[in-house]
Image (cartoon, rainbow, N blue to C red):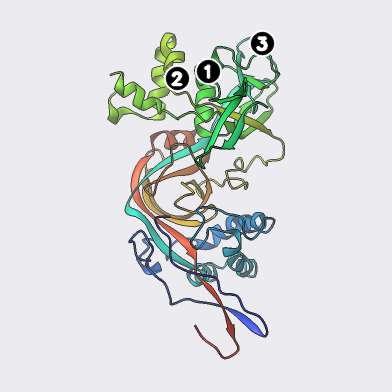
Amino acid sequence: MSHTLISKILRGAGAAAIALLSACAVPNEGGHPPVAFSDLQGWGADAAQQSLPVFLTECRHLGRLPADATLGSDSGPGAHVGDWLPACRAAAALPTGDAQAARAFYERWFQPVQVGDGSTLFTGYYEPEIRGSLSRGGIYQTPVYRVPDDLVRTRATDGRMVTGRWQGGQFVPYWSRAQIDAGALAGRNLELLWVADPADLFFLQIQGSGRVRLPSGQVARLGFGGKNGLDYVPLGRVLVRDGAMAEDDVSMQSIRAWLTAHPAQARTTMEENPNYVFFNMLDHVYVDQGAPGAMGVPLSPGQSAAIDRRVIPLGAPIWVETTLPAPSAGTWQRLVFAQDIGTDIQGASRADLFLGWGADAEQTAGKMRQHGRMVVFLPRPVVIQSQGGGS
């Protein structure tokens, strides 16, 4: 873990009181020293109390998991559920709407540590709304599939997790996008619903969740169910390689416009990305909430992010300093939470900000390729002190 701090949780017994070890920070293994809260641009102005409901929602989820369950890599503060529980108990006792108390809580229970070299690439994602139907007919000819029962995720002999299927006693790669488009899954009753445009499905799969407006006016919610395990190939990279687009012109909007303008090439171009995502129907998600992310809690617009969990543990608060493109142009200095992962989000210098749903979220997410600073808040070590003792 590139930002790991060296710490242990010490346990004792008897008439002991839990106290925070607030002054014994150690530089992390990646060479980046801890960061002072006073060095965070905009920290004093941030409405920290607005982030507490998100953190408390995480805490309720964590409280249902084993304390030794992993949230990231196998070592370092924040890697296991139990590392967060003392801070969760402290957060539950805070008064609501008190910005000063909220800031004091974060400053007492967490150590900020810079991730990467201070030049993180921030992209954005959102929850698209597309047209669809629960039955096939008319313009609705593109199936949205649930997770197939022969999709298997297992551990290879070298320890890696791999995805595929069994065929004639051999474990083989799962069907690619091109093979699925050609009918590899047809006739297996896997269709959740049908959408009007293959490109709608393609971008729905990139975002990982979405809303489908049915002919009745009702909205069906779709959440990430699984993927075929094949490499993700960005379509912008394909179009630049083929000379169809300049690198500086690549955005979600420009890619979508190219697909619309070249219907004869659209399918084969999208099939250059063999990665394929399957969905679940979400029946119990409020309309004002995002779909659940990888952590299992609903994503919050402007307060959730997708990260590489090998670098940042799921659930960790992250201070972000960057800017937003139009139409939401402006400075972004706020606390978000590591609640999701993404195929293309790898390493210490990448993060994907969840921007919500609707037209503005779509426009901003499609253009978002901003650099900035990412600082993760890791739980400080907790020590058991006997009465009268100290750290």
Marks 3/2: CA distance?
23 Å
What mark, if any, has residue 389 been given in the picture? none
Q: Is residue 327 visible?
A: yes
Q: Is residue 358 visible?
A: no
Q: Secondary structure at mark 1?
A: helix
Callout 3: 10 Å neighbours few (<14), some, many (20+)? few
Marks 3/1: CA distance?
15 Å
**Between 338 and 326, the one nearer to me in the picture:** 338
**Which residue is pictured at 57% across the width and 91% down the height?**
388
Q: Of the residues under marks 3 and 1, which one precedes in the sequence?
A: 3
Type of the residue with mark 1: Pro
Q: Which residue is mark 3?
A: 137
Q: Which residue is mark 1?
A: 198
User: Compared to 256, does 283 lie above or below?
Assistant: below
- Picture quarter with the N terminus: bottom left
User: Compared to 96, does 215 lie above or below?
Assistant: above
Q: Secondary structure at mark 3?
A: loop
Type of the residue with mark 3: Gly
Q: Which residue is mark 2?
A: 270
Marks 2/1: CA distance?
9 Å
| 334 lies left or right of 55 | left
Q: Secondary structure at mark 2?
A: helix
From the viewer's perspective, is the residue at label 2 or at label 1 nearer?
2
Q: Position of residue 185 (x, y in %)?
A: 62, 17
Q: Position of residue 348 (x, y in %)?
A: 39, 49
**Between 165 and 31, the one nearer to me in the picture:** 165
